[in-house]
Amino acid sequence: MTLVTGSWLLDAVLLLVLLLYWYMTRNFGYWKKLGIPYWKPTPFVGNVGSVLIGRKHLGEPVLECYHRAGDARFMGMIAFDKPLLMVKDPELVGRVMSTDFSTFYATNAKFDPVSDPLFAMSLFGQHGPGWKKLRSALSPAFTSGKIKLMFHIVNEVGQNLARHLETEGSKGDAVELKDTMARYTTDVVCSIFMGVDAGSLEDPNSTVRVNLRDLRREDLVGRIKTTLLFFAPKLISFLHVRLGRKELEDYFVQNIGQLMDDRKEKRIVRNDAVDLLLKIKESQLSGDVDSKQEMENQKAVTEDKTLKLTNELLASQLMSFLGAGFETSSSTLSFCLYELARNVELQEEVRQHVRQVLRKHGGQPTYEALNEMTDLTNVVNEALRMYPPVSFLDREAARDYKIPGADIVLPKGTGVVISVLGLHNDPRYWKEPQRFMPARFRQENSKDRPSYTFLPFGEGPRLCLGMRVAYLQVKLALIHILNNFEVLPTPETPSSLRYEPSKLIGTPAGKVALRFRKIPVC
């Protein structure tokens, strides 16, 4: 046999490279065969190379595909070797997220159960029947009635935040927004989901704070792993890649497990998520259910003998809620305060509305007062629109799927992505989308907007279970801040914000400094 390079070793390397090239480009004609317009990919990385090298955030290639699609309802793209259909039309988005959920129940992102067993058994890592059973089991702990029981816990942390900002403001120094808000939400989620005072506002280097912050790697390796999770999950499984850090996962699971044992043994009741999940586990949830659906969920859990709510399973859920809850809410708070600082007139308008409601309820925040603060809710929603923490959503077709309104059948196993950033900033649905205008969420201004154009928490059966907790901790922080402080920019405050490329959650890049000037409370 004739050697190509004159060396068996070099020939073997050349053959390996050619085989790898073939494998990584074998699907490059996928969309052309289906008759779907597509974004031309680059060998080995497809359309996501900019994410790997740290130039763009994970959701930006999906957003770029959204813009490239123009007036088309959907467009094909390639992530490494995996074809993904970017769905742009709100009606088709609704089909994927809700109407045809039986086909799109699974996400494209999948954790490897061998290397990442804890995340694989969490609600985020479950698919199909396993997900449905677990979702039904956990849902009763996140109803509005159960969130109301947690109000006093979050409010106490909100009071700590106000004291912390008063101390920092008295020094005359600007406050670094991202770190401060992350310390606040760390204290909230640790109190709710771990039953402990993390002490982050007092000590930024507290053990719980540092371990939670470092749960996800945000260096080059972490960025590559996260990109592979969403865009090349088969490679994650093949290589048995662990996304998190085992020693940190063990820390949280051991502490949460010990906490649950102590609660049961000492009969401690705090009405936090730990208590509620333990009650579900023991089938002792009280009869004051909020809805018929909650009763059905409880009955399903009790009757389903295949789902064993072990301490390990519950600990994995609590750990995943910890990781998801602190960063998404701290990001939203940072964006809210940044925009309010840049618009003093709007800030004062919202402050007066907050104070008016507080006076009606005796001057102190209550759960009922919180729900009456519609202007504040609109501020949060506008921040979620402009800067969604989750910039894109993903699904996978469980069977062949005929796309409504098109003579195209999407093959089983094809991934689908939805650009939340694209929908939230599309001028067809939002007037002047680059302007921060909370009034657009008033009922009279939003009645004509199409469904499935505002998706900060997803939609359909996989709607984020922690949505009510997120609104609670964000709104309570804003109440304590706006009632006590005027929030002002500094000369160093950036004129615009973009996402930090290294983070999975949409988080402001760089430092964001603001001043908090104490004002008389109502």
Image (cartoon, grey):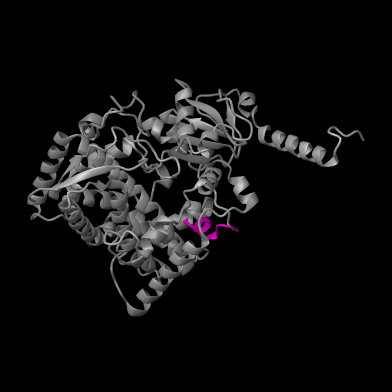
Task: State which quadrant residue 300 falls in.
Answer: bottom left
212 left or right of 338?
right
Q: Is residue 127 magenta?
A: no
Q: Residue 202 at x, y = what percent?
A: 26, 61
Residue sitting at 70 percent across and 34 percent down?
21
Residue 120 in percent (x, y) is at 53, 56
- Say above or below: 103 vs 139: above
The quadrant of the image that shows the N terminus is top right
Count of number-bearing discs: 0
Which segment is the magenta one?
Answer: 115-122
Our reading of the magenta stretch's main secondary structure is: helix
Q: Is residue 117 located in the magenta-colored stretch of the structure?
A: yes
Q: In this view, does 27 lie above or below 123?
A: above
- 460 relative position to 286: left or right: right
Residue 512 lies, in percent from the top left, at 29, 42
Is residue 304 something that shows in the picture? no
Q: Going 29% across and 44% down the picture, which residue do you hit?
A: 334
Residue visible at 26% across and 38% down? 492
- The image shows residue 257 at horizontal and vertical percentages of 43, 70
Q: Is residue 344 above or below residue 191?
A: above
User: Which residue is most to the bottom?
Assistant: 265
Q: Is residue 471 visible?
A: yes
